[in-house]
Image (spheres, helix red, strand yellow):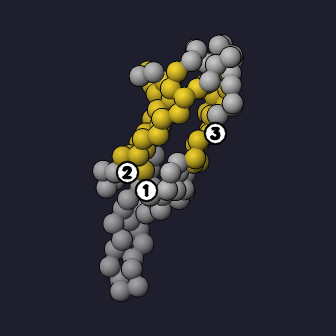
Amino acid sequence: MTAKPRIKLPESAAPGEIIEIKALIQHVMETGNRKTPEGQPIPRNIIHTFTVTFEGATVFSADWGPGIAANPFVGFFFRVPGPGTLEFTWIDDAGERTVERTPLAVS
């Protein structure tokens, strides 16, 4: 995962408001079922865990399998408790962990 994840939040939200959060990360999501032109298997390397926390509390979590598409996109709704920071974490089979922190503006 080399590209910076793209995360979309509203510019500001009120406490108690339900907002939509969207996240996209570039990843090949190699299933392990394909082979190189020489016939060698390409090792599986997918993002298997995606977690979002708000001030340390998990607010969204997903465990993915090889059926997920390359460059996975996820959207979910979240009730705003107040100001704070959302932390997005992606972990793949190679052990690479990508973490992106995004402040949530509350008005």
Judging depth in this view, the residue of 74 and 81 nearest the camera is: 81
Of the two numbered discs 3 and 1 on the same chain, state the one appearing first in sequence: 1
Nearer to us: label 2 or label 3:
3
Q: Local crowd at mark 3 within 10 Å, few (<14), some, or many (≥20)?
A: few
Q: Is residue 30 left or right of residue 16?
A: left
Q: Which residue is mark 3?
A: 8
Front residue of 49 and 25: 25
Please state which of residues 36 and 1 is positioned toward the viewer in this rendering: 1
Residue 40, position in %: x, y? 32, 79
User: Which amino acid, mark 3?
Assistant: Lys
Q: Could you say where residue 23 lies in the image, as x and y percent from the top left?
A: 58, 43
Q: Which mark is residue 1?
A: 1
Quadrant (top left, top right, bottom left, bottom right) of the C terminus = top right
Label 2 sits on residue: 92
Report the residue at 34% width, 51% height from top: 96
Query: Residue 66: in sight, yes or no?
Result: yes
